[in-house]
Amino acid sequence: MLGERRSTARMSAAEAREQVELALRYLEEGRALVEKDPVQASERLYRAAEEAVKALALHFGLSEVLEKVEKRGWWTATELDKAVSRIAAKLGRWFRAAWDEAWALHVWGFHEAKLDSESVREREPDIERIVMEARKLVSGEAPNARSA
């Protein structure tokens, strides 16, 4: 969550893996809710992407971002956006585009409650790609760098 307090500078690789596990849980919860509750599905899918971004920020050692989070004590939309930019520079523009879909779920799907099940379902593959890429990288598998 944006206001979540964590000591990010001291987080270990094991903690990054825990964040990926949390992202996977949110992904599954979001998928299960798409048809019956698109508002809650939107937030779960967004949270999956958010946790994956945090895990990748740790994995890539994005010290500029992590130091700000550490100093403030929580993540803001600004730090998430900076992390996404740095991660996209490493993995390709697809990551930015997928994050933008996650952000649309957060704003239009959850806060504004304007997205129906179909609109949420259309964005789910982008969220899955973010989470699965984080899982691969944090677990030590080869990245899918710079793919479309």
Image: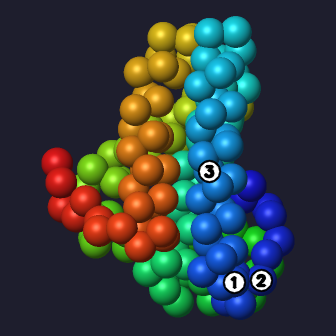
How far separated are the C-alphas under marks 1 and 2? 7 Å
Mark-to-mark CA distance, 3 and 2: 18 Å
Amino acid type assigned to the residue bearing label 3 in the image: Ala
Distance Cα–Cα, label 1 vs label 3 = 16 Å
Counting from the top left corner in percent of width and height, residue 67 is at 63, 89
Question: Would residue 34 be found to the left or right of residue 95 on screen?
Answer: right
SS under mark 1: loop
Residue 142 spot, x, y in % from top left: 29, 68
Mark 1 surroundings: few (<14), some (14-19) or many (≥20) residues within 10 A: few
- For disc 2, the marked residue is 7
- Left or right of 21? Residue 139 is left
Question: In the depicted view, which residue is nearer to us: 81 or 5?
Answer: 5
- State the residue position of label 1: 11
Q: Are marks 1 and 3 in contact (CB under 8 Å)?
A: no
Instruction: Tell me the amino acid under the disc marked 1.
Output: Met
- Name which quarter of the figure residue 116 lies in: top right
Which residue does the image show at 65% across and 77% down from the upper left? 14
Residue 8 pos. (x, y %) = 70, 81
Q: Residue at x 52, y 21 (%)?
A: 120
Viewer-nearest of discs 3 and 2: 3
> Which type of secondary structure does the marked residue at label 3 adopt?
helix
Q: Secondary structure at mark 2?
A: loop
